[in-house]
Image (cartoon, rainbow, N blue to C red):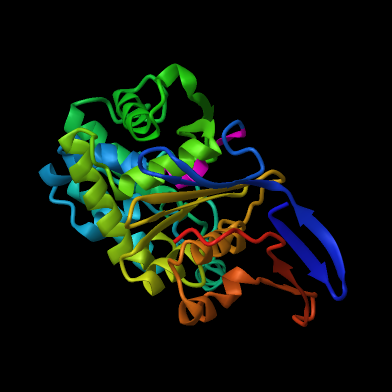
Amino acid sequence: MLLEIARGPLVEEIQRGHLAIVDAEGTTLAALGDPEHAVAYWRSSAKPFQSMALVASGAADAFGFAAEDLAVCSASHNGEAVHISRVAHVLDLAGNTPGDLQCGAHPPYDQASAAALERAGTAPSALHSNCSGKHAGMLALARHLGAPTEGYRRPDHPVQRLILETVCRFTGLRSDEIVIGVDGCGVPCFGISVSRMALAFARVMRPDGLPVADQRAAAAVRGAMMSHPYLVAGAGRFDTDLMRIAGGRILVKGGASGVLCAGLERGVGIAVKLESGSRHLGSGAPAIVAALRALGAIGDAELADLTAHAHPVVRNVAGQSVGETRVPFALPALR
């Protein structure tokens, strides 16, 4: 059991799942559940690795991408104005347009931005999709490879083949050991064990032994995300708040269906998967915060700044606090 949700004096709901803490050499430092055998889709927690293919190929340099561009290419963003303008900039740099995006459209995650669209009577566009940055990066990679931009979502497209190869190197898996599904935005998603998710995040922080192009790509993408965390998510989001507070020491990327991963600068990866899943990105944040505490990666002051994520409040329809989400496990000190 990874989380319990209490309402008043009773535990009303429990969240079972898997947690792995792994170093860059593949040694498991701690585990809950069965992360070695629990296979799940990586969902948006894979976005940093999808962006790394863009960098390692030379496309990011060829089009003059700045760190801010790489951050939004790795994002599950809120659809705020700053995100929309940066995605449009990425498209423009590579000679693409919003009409080339094949990610579909949904209202912004940011409630204020969604309300502003509704008041204006404007329908959300593909730019508002939380995955629009990733798709803009994929379109740029297609241009750089001289491949068709049409159909860039297909698993057999050169863009997706290159991304799969990148995922293989960071996870240490062969392509036939990865289950390929279709993500919410239409591109391939990768079914791997929770332990391999943690390993990949350890390796992105310490990519020693990987090809030089991968090492450079890892440095560029993790640096971009940690330097510009607001572009990775946005207001009120765990990814943004943790990376801002950590000041370049921790990389974090949430995904759908209860997946959340983090990497520490010393080469340790953490991955969480809630079995029941969740539509809320960052739902596994309390478990990640507990792991970071056990690793000595955050102190009391940082924990206080993360209270809203470490102990999410349960509210009724009147907005009153009636309970909270708690972590029922205790990890040993792993410093």
Q: Quadrant of residue 37?
A: top right
Q: Number of marks in the image?
A: 0
Percent x, y for residue 22?
46, 45
Residue furthest to the right = 10
Q: Is residue 44 magenta?
A: yes
Residue at image coords 28%, 47%: 206
Of the pair 119 and 281, the residue shown nearer to us: 281
Rendered position, 316 above or below 328: below
Is residue 79 found left or right of 229 in the rendered image? right
Percent x, y for residue 205?
31, 50
* Location of the C terminus (image quadrant): bottom left
Percent x, y for residue 91?
26, 48
Rendered position, 297 above or below 305: above
Rendered position, 135 above or below 229: above
Of the pair 32 and 238, the residue shown nearer to us: 32
Percent x, y for residue 73?
33, 50
Is residue 69 found left or right of 251 in the rendered image? left
Of the pair 261 and 123, the residue shown nearer to us: 261
Of the pair 93 and 271, the residue shown nearer to us: 271
Is residue 145 found left or right of 326 in the rendered image? left
Q: Quadrant of residue 72?
A: bottom left
Q: Quadrant of residue 56?
A: top left
Is residue 268 found left or right of 119 in the rendered image? left
Residue furthest to the top = 176
Residue bounds of the magenta highlight: 38-47
Rendered position, 109 above or below 96: below
Camera sees residue 23: yes
Camera sees residue 136: no
Q: Is residue 304 magenta?
A: no
Residue at image coords 38%, 67%: 230
